C-alpha cells in the first residue's frame, strides 16, 4: 500500500461515499423540495434520486478507458471538481427541470470518482485480498447512509433545504484536498493502454465475453435493483404506510447499521471461506427472508415491526454480496482494471437503478410491490449464478473458492 492500510480504506470509503451521500443526505428533504417546486405527482420527487443514479451509469464506459490511458488520479481530481461545482449549482436551480439536469451532471462526475477508486483498489489487490479490502471500504462507506439522513435533517433544522446540496460541495472539496496530497498514482506509465478504438473495443470484448465476469455482473445488477427500489420509496414506506416518517432517519440508520456490520464480517470471513461460498449462501438467505416477509404481509397484514426486523436482516445480506460479486467479476481483469471496473459499474448500476426505478414507481401505498420484487429479483440473480457456475454452487469445483 502506498499509504497506511487504514488511511487507504478510509480514503476509498470517502470516495465511494460521494455516491451514497449524493443520494441519502437528501432523503428527508424530498417532500420539502417537491413542495417548493409545486410537484403535482408525489412520486416525481423520486426523480431527484434517479436523475443522479442515471448520470452515474453510462459515463463509466468512457471513464474506464480514460483511466487506463491517463491514470486514475487525474480522472479522480477532475471528477471531484465537477462534483463540487454541481453541488453548489443545485442550490440555485430555478426550476425542477434544471435541478434534475444538475443532478444528472453530478451523477456523471460521481461516476468518474467511482471508476477511479475501483481501479485503484484493483491495481493494488485481487481475489480474496480485494474482497477483504472492498468489504472494509464498504463497512466505512456504510456509515454514510447511517448518518446522511440525520445530517440532512440537521441541516434543514438550522438552514434552508438548499444547503443539503451545498454540503455535497463541501464534502467533495475535502476529499479533493485529501487525495491531492496523500494519494500517489497507482498506474505505472508503462502499464498505460493506448487510447485507441482498437484497444477500447478489445478491452470491452475481453470483459463482455468472460463468463465469470459477465455472470456476476448481471447477478449483482439484478439483486441490487432491490436496494435502489427501497432507497427510492423508503420515505414513502415509513411515512405513508406505517406513519413513522418523523423517525425515518433512525430506522434507516438501523438498516444501514446491520449492512455495515455484515460488510465488516465479510472482510473477516472471506479469506477463510471464499467469495463464492459466502455469497451463494447469502443469496439463498436473501430469498428466504423476503419470502417470509411477503407471506406474513399476505396472510396477516402489514405489521411494522415484523416488516422492519425481517427487512433489516434481508438488507444485511447485501453486505456479503456486493464485495464478493465485484471481486469475482474483476478477478481476471487486472490488465484492464479501469475498463473492467467501468463496464461492471455501468452494467450493474444501470440495471439495478432501472429495476429499482420501476419498482419504486409501482408504490401503491403498501409494501406489496417492494416485497414481490425482492423475491423475484433474488430468484433471478440466483438463476444467473447457477448458469454462470454451470450448476456448481458454494465453490464446488472451483478450487479454494
Image (spheres, rainbow, N blue to C red):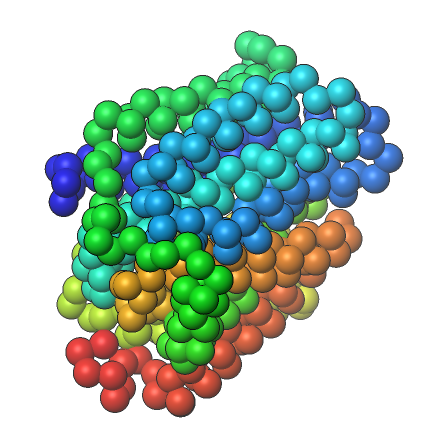
Residue 141, x across and y down, in percent: 36, 41
Using residue 17 as the reference point, say whether residue 366 is left or right of it.
right
Above or below residue 197? Residue 97 is above
Q: Is residue 277 left or right of residue 196?
A: left
Residue 103 appearing in the image:
yes
Q: Is residue 217 visible?
A: no
Q: Position of residue 71 (x, y in %)?
A: 32, 45
Up the image or down, 365 lies above or below 174; here it is: below
- Residue toward you, 89 or 41: 89
- Compared with 75, 124 (above or below) is below
* Quadrant where the image shows the C terminus: bottom left
Q: Nearer the viewer, residue 171 or 184?
A: 184
| Residue at (24% x, 25% y) in the render | 181
Residue lying furthest top in this view? Answer: 158
Point 46% across, 27% down: residue:
81
- Total number of numbered labels? 0
**What residue appears at the point 36 percent right and 51 percent down from the top-left corner?**
69
Residue 358 at x, y percent in the picture: 70, 58
> Splitting the image into 4 quarters, where does residue 206 fall?
bottom left
Q: Residue at x 31, y 66 (%)?
A: 333
Is residue 3 left or right of 85 when viewed as pictured? left
Q: Position of residue 257 (x, y in %)?
A: 38, 43
Q: Quadrant of the N terminus?
A: top left
Q: Is residue 267 above or below residue 289?
A: above
Amino acid at each position: 500500500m502506498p499509504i497506511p492500510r487504514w488511511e487507504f480504506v478510509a480514503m476509498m470509503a470517502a470516495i465511494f461515499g460521494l455516491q451514497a451521500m449524493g443520494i441519502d443526505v437528501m432523503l428527508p428533504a424530498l417532500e420539502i423540495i417537491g413542495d417548493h417546486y409545486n410537484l403535482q405527482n408525489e412520486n416525481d420527487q423520486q426523480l431527484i434520486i434517479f436523475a443522479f443514479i442515471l448520470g452515474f451509469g453510462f459515463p463509466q464506459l468512457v471513464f474506464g478507458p480514460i483511466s487506463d490511458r491517463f491514470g486514475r488520479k487525474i480522472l479522480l481530481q477532475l471528477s471531484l471538481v465537477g462534483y463540487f461545482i454541481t453541488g453548489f449549482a443545485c442550490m440555485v436551480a430555478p426550476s425542477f427541470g434544471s435541478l434534475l439536469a444538475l443532478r444528472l451532471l453530478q451523477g456523471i462526475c460521481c461516476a468518474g470518482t467511482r471508476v477511479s477508486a475501483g481501479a485503484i483498489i484493483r491495481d493494488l489487490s485481487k481475489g480474496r485480498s480485494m474482497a477483504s479490502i472492498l468489504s472494509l471500504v464498504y463497512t466505512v462507506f456504510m456509515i454514510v447512509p447511517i448518518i446522511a439522513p440525520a445530517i440532512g435533517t440537521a441541516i434543514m433544522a438550522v438552514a434552508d433545504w438548499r444547503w443539503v446540496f451545498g454540503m455535497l460541495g463541501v464534502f467533495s472539496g475535502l476529499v479533493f484536498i485529501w487525495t491531492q496530497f496523500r494519494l500517489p498514482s497507482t498506474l505505472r506509465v508503462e502499464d498505460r493502454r493506448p487510447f485507441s478504438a482498437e484497444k477500447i473495443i478489445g478491452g470491452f470484448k475481453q470483459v463482455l465475453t468472460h463468463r465469470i465476469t459477465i455472470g456476476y455482473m448481471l447477478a449483482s445488477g439484478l439483486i441490487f435493483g432491490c436496494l435502489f427500489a427501497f432507497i427510492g420509496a423508503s420515505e414513502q414506506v415509513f411515512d405513508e404506510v406505517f406513519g413513522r416518517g418523523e423517525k425515518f432517519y433512525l430506522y434507516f440508520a438501523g438498516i444501514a447499521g446491520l449492512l455495515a456490520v455484515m460488510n465488516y464480517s465479510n472482510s473477516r470471513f472471506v479469506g477463510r471461506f471464499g467469495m463464492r461460498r459466502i455469497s451463494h449462501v447469502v443469496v439463498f438467505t436473501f430469498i428466504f427472508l423476503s419470502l417470509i416477509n411477503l407471506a406474513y404481509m399476505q396472510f396477516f397484514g402489514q405489521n411494522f415491526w415484523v416488516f422492519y426486523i425481517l427487512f433489516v436482516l434481508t438488507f444485511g445480506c447485501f453486505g456479503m454480496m456486493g464485495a464478493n460479486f465485484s471481486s469475482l467479476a474483476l478477478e481476471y481483469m487486472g490488465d484492464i482494471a479501469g475498463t473492467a471496473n467501468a463496464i461492471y459499474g455501468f452494467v450493474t448500476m444501470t440495471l439495478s437503478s432501472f429495476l429499482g426505478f420501476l419498482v419504486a414507481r409501482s408504490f401503491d401505498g403498501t409494501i406489496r410491490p417492494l416485497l414481490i420484487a425482492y423475491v423475484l429479483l433474488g430468484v433471478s440473480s440466483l438463476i444467473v449464478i447457477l448458469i454462470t457456475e454451470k450448476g456448481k454452487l458454494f465453490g464446488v469445483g472451483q478450487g479454494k473458492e
